[in-house]
Structures are given as C-alpha cells and as structure tokens.
Image (cartoon, rainbow, N blue to C red):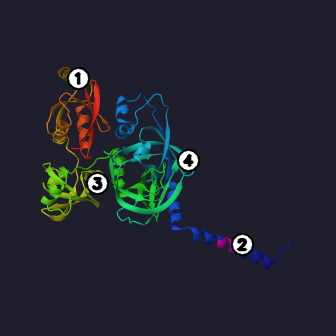
Amino acid sequence: MRIRPALTCSLFLVVVFISGAAASNLDNRRTPVVRAAQKAGPAVVNIFTEEAPRGNQNPFRNFFGDSFFKRFFGNVPNRRESARRSLGSGVIINPKGYILTNEHVIAQAVRIQVTLLDDREYEAQLIGADARSDLAVIKIDPEAPLPYVPMGRSDDLMIGETVIAIGNPFGLHHTVTQGIISALHRTVRANRQQVYSDFIQVDASINPGNSGGPLLNINGSLIGINTAIYQDAEGIGFAIPIDNARRIVNDLIEYGTVRRGWLGVTVQDITPDLARYFKLEKFAGVLITRLVPKGPASTGGLRQGDVITSIGDHQVINKSDYFQALSSYTIDDTVQLGIVRNGSRSSLRIRLAGIPPSYAREFAYQWLGIEVQQVSPAVQRNYRLFAEEGVVITKVLPNGPCGQVGIQPGDVIRRVNRDTIRTQEDYEKAVMEAGKLSSVVLLVQRGRSGYYVTLEP
C-alpha cells in the first residue's frame, strides 16, 4: 500500500514529538544528584587487595588482646592462614591514574588490583600511605587518560547541605547514596589512645567497602574521603575533609611519605587553675611551656605562657586536639594560630619547618626522660642483654614519664608505636614522629620478657 505524502509527514512529526517528549522527560528527571553521580561515577574504582599469609602469632597478642595489638602493629603474618582478599573504594584524582583511598584499605597488601566502572582491571602500585591520617595514594598505568575528579574544597561546607557518597559497599559496585552533612569538625575516639578529629559527619549510607570512596557535594566536587562508620548505629558516617587530605596527598605523591610540619613547642592541657591564672574564659586550649630556640614558634612570635586556642579553623580544646589538628600540615605550610596572651586574644601566622636531626636526642630526653644507646656486642655484655637489636636505656629521669611507670636502665626498647627499633636512628626518627601525638606506646624488653607501656608525656 502506498502512503500519502501528507500522512508520511504526520507520522514523522508524531515520532519527533514522542522522541522530543522522552528527551524532555529525561532532562526533567536529571536532578543535581543524578548529574553529580554521572559526572563522578566513572572516576570511582573498586579496590581488591591480597594480604600476606599470616605467620606465627606474637605471644604479646594473647596478653594484651587482639584489638590492642592490631591498633598499633597491624596484622602479623600467620603461616596457618592463606592469603586473604579485602575490598574498598578509591577515587581517581589525576588522569594519569593516581587514586586516593584510605590507608586501612591497602594496609598489609602485597598485591593491589583496581577495577574501573567499565570493568577494566589493573594492577596498582603503592605510591605512599600514611596511617595517622588514614590516607594512601596508589597508581595504575592506563592506556589513555582516565576520567577523574579534581579535589574541591571543604572550608565552606554547611551543615544540612546535600552530599553524595559513591563506593562499593559489600562488593556492590558503584553504589550511590545521598544524605546531608550532619556535623563538622567531629572528633571520634577509636580507642583510649587513638583519636581522630576534624571529620565530616554525614547521614548518607556508608558501609564496609565504601572506605576510600569520594564524598561529593551537589555540584559533583570532591569534598571528602569516606572513612568510618559507627557499627552500632544507622545514618552516622564520617569522611576526611578534602582540604586536610590535599596537603597529605601532595607529600605522598612527591615524597612517598608525609613530611609533617613542626612548630617547635612543648604544650600541656589547661586546668581550671591555669584557666584562672591566664585569664581564660574557659579551660580550653593548650599552654606553651617551652619553645625550641630558633624553632618556627620562637621565630614566628609565640612566647612561653601563650595559650593556643585554635589551629586553622579547628578549635583546640586539649593536647589531643592540638596534635590532631597540627598533623594535617606539612613542612613549609603556613598555619594560623589563635592564641590568648595576657588575657587578650590574637592570631599569628607561622610557617612550619622540619625537625632538625640534631634535636632528636634532646627531644627524646626532654619528652620521655630517658637516654639510650644502640645495642651492640659490647653493650650486650655490659648490660647482660638477651636482645640483639634495639636501643638500651642508659639513664632514666626518676620523675620523667618513663621513670614514673617503672622503666629502668638496662631495659631495651624494641618498638615505638608501629615502628620496629633496630638502631639509634630508628629510635630517634620514631620518637620524633611519636612526639606529634598525644601518647606513645613502647614495647620494652627486660631480660627474656617483653611488655607494653603507654605514656602520655
């Protein structure tokens, strides 16, 4: 049958109208959340890790408990267990294949595999990881530039604004959830020793496997890295602000490690009596008790007796807040400090520096109240040591932190937090790193026995 030209034209117009209506309907349904998910989705990856087989159990684990041991020393290999695979998420932050994720996602990994949205798989290499900030950078080598999400900003976040999380919860690839920012600058205590601060709290659904994935604002900008959940609660998740992550990431990519900035002061918590003496409205902040000569603080205008009340936009309540807030700044960063001096509030901008190697021994003595010497055959004979590695304590200040818990000359330090101590250099480096925290855990050997000591100098 032959169709008349007028009828043909009418059918064509009907088809065009239906197609146009369908397209218009899609446009109406493409909300900001949809656009943000479409924009960032291709840059979100699934991370699989293969961990080393576990060896014999450490005898200290049974005494102190598994959770304590894991918090400070991670998983110790056990030959009785085969290699394990875990998964998490990550976000591509550079078209060359740099991927930002959580340190705990790739910790202990001997092999890292990455799967893209289009199911392409790549072997990834570790560029750098930092346990203190729980951030890591890995890299894949793509054949062509990859879609990526540039790092946005988190200094202008608003409580109540819409946020989007993308990740791989329970292995369900590229799951998108939506929520709001519930709070800012949250401090979360992981255990008695470990405190994380300055988190973004969100009510978007975050589950195991989301770790390391992006938190986005309504424009699809990367504002945080999803990190933690409360296992016993619903609608409470936490993300690392991207402004904090940016400083860490730059160091990880360039140096493979984080070169944390040093202020060059010793501080203590404010007590009610000190608050009255220094004319503080409330007992919050940290009191500067000592400045290192020619250090960043002394040359930048800080004085003994000043009270630090804020670092950047983070309020400082106690030493834990102080160390956590300062830990996201690296060498040559300029930090703005809020201070109280003689009852008056002011602010100073100070450029942070690296810790001089020559200061390490002095700092260890001032901070822990001990002097040490590297274990050698002669030292072994002198102190009748069973240990062949580590540093032996040669002097203890009776009223110092170590002296107060019963550490004695002849004890050997084998670990400082997560760091194994084999040489004097290991010890000095580990103590300087630990000095940026509010507490330190030492593994001490006395004779054939070992014990852990937690100090809050």
Residue tagged 1: 385
Identify residue type, mark 1.
Leu
Task: Identify the residue shown where x is 51% and y is 64%.
Answer: 33
Identify residue type, mark 2.
Val
> x%, y% of residue 384?
21, 21
- Residue 29, compared with residue 379, is above or below; it is below
Q: What stretch is highlighted in magenta?
A: 17-21
Give the SS element for disc 3: helix
Label 1 packing within 10 angstroms: few (<14), some (14-19), many (20+): many
Mark toward the start of the polypeptide (1 vs 3): 3
Mark toward the start of the polypeptide (4 vs 3): 4
Instruction: Give the alpha-carbon distance from disc 1 to disc 4, as whole Å.
Output: 55 Å
Instruction: Give the alpha-carbon distance from disc 1 to disc 2, as whole Å.
Output: 90 Å
Residue tagged 2: 15
Residue tagged 4: 120
Instruction: Give the alpha-carbon distance from disc 2 to disc 3, as whole Å.
Output: 61 Å
Residue tagged 3: 325
> x%, y% of residue 178?
49, 61
Discs 2, 4 touching: Cβ within 8 Å? no
Q: In this view, does 431 lie to the left or right of 240?
A: left
Discs 1, 3 touching: Cβ within 8 Å? no
Label 2 packing within 10 angstroms: few (<14), some (14-19), many (20+): few
Mark toward the start of the polypeptide (2 vs 4): 2
